[in-house]
Amino acid sequence: MGITGPEGHPLSRPPMVEAEAANRAIAIADVLGVPIYVVHVSCVEAAEAIARARARGQRVYGEVLAGHLVVDESVYRHPDFATAAAHVMSPPFRAKTHQEFLWRGLQSGNLHTTATDHCTFCAEQKAAGKSDFSKIPNGCGGVEERLAVLWDEGVNTGRLTPSEFVAVTSANAAKLFNIYPQKGSVSVGADADLVVWDPAGTKTLSAKTQFSKGDFNIFEGRTVKGIPSHTVSQGKLVFVQGDLRAERGVGRYLKRPAFGPDFGASKLRAEALAPTAVVR
């Protein structure tokens, strides 16, 4: 039966609304003289707004979700309500024509990080909106599959180099969120958090085999080539060839400065451009 969003619901809003929001936020950041990080870029128009601002020298950064790079809006027309509802999120999945432009944003350096907005709801929870679309809980999973999907659709197709893959999945985020080189770097003194990658390994993604506790997988049935073989966290093996060894409670809070180098640079630039006061 599929689903159709009522007027005003995020699913019904055209990409131009997202683009307008991005343009306004970028303009406000420019006036304030601060860097800005735009999350969930899902359409050509928003990506172009970021590219224009960066061409002017503004410190603007963009994030794209793995799902928006490979899943398109046809999922909302699926005859099974549960399947269609499982894909409801914001921004919604767009027309397929947007995907290649988002990939080009990553290639060109105008989009900098990849995320998932991992927020899962089971079929029973999604069913709350069966008679009222606006009551469908908003969110999808995907954090477990992010790297494999990006490698398969990015590196294996030539859209990204292995080094660019590392940048958009790890190093760039560490730098932007001010925890580099503690994270995002393989160097003396950095945290021993590493993923060992098997570029020849394959896996078919499915809710039946995922470690995540959700009952749906937006990449269901997709076979990817390029998967993690080992994961090291704090110097300990926590994933080995499909064997999950993570332990509850071993995570730790990482304190980081609120303002990174970009803020300092923006402040210096604003001071340099400020008009000199005239004393009479």
Image (spheres, rainbow, N blue to C red):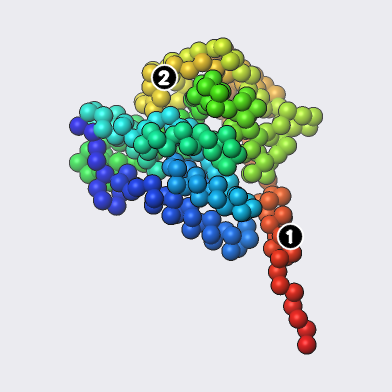
Label 2 sits on a secondary structure element that is loop
- Which residue carries the number 2 mark? 222
User: Is 241 situated above or below 146?
Assistant: above
Looking at this view, name the residue that lies furthest to the right. 188
**In the depicted structure, whether residue 33 falls above or below residue 60:** below
Q: Quadrant of the C terminus?
A: bottom right
Residue 219 showing in the rendered view: yes
Give the residue at x 48% y 58%: 24
**At which x and y percent is residue 109?**
60, 39
Point out residue 195 in the picture as x, y percentages from the top left corner: 63, 22
Tell me the residue at 54%/20% (across/down).
156
93 or 131, which lies in front? 93
Which amino acid does the dot numbered 1 rest on?
A: Leu
In the picture shown, does residue 225 fall above or below 124?
Answer: above
* Dot 2 alpha-carbon crowd within 10 angstroms: few under 14, some 14 to 19, many 20 or more: few
Spatial distance from mark 2 to mark 1, Cα to Cα?
48 Å
Q: Residue at x 53, y 35 (%)?
A: 104
Q: Earlier in the sequence, mark 2 or mark 1?
A: 2
* Left or right position of 77 against 72: left
Q: Mark 1 — residue? A: 268
Residue 34 - label: none
The image quadrant that residue 94 belongs to is: top left
Camera-nearest residue between 61 and 122: 61
> Where does the image place residue 125, in percent across and percent down from the top left?
31, 36
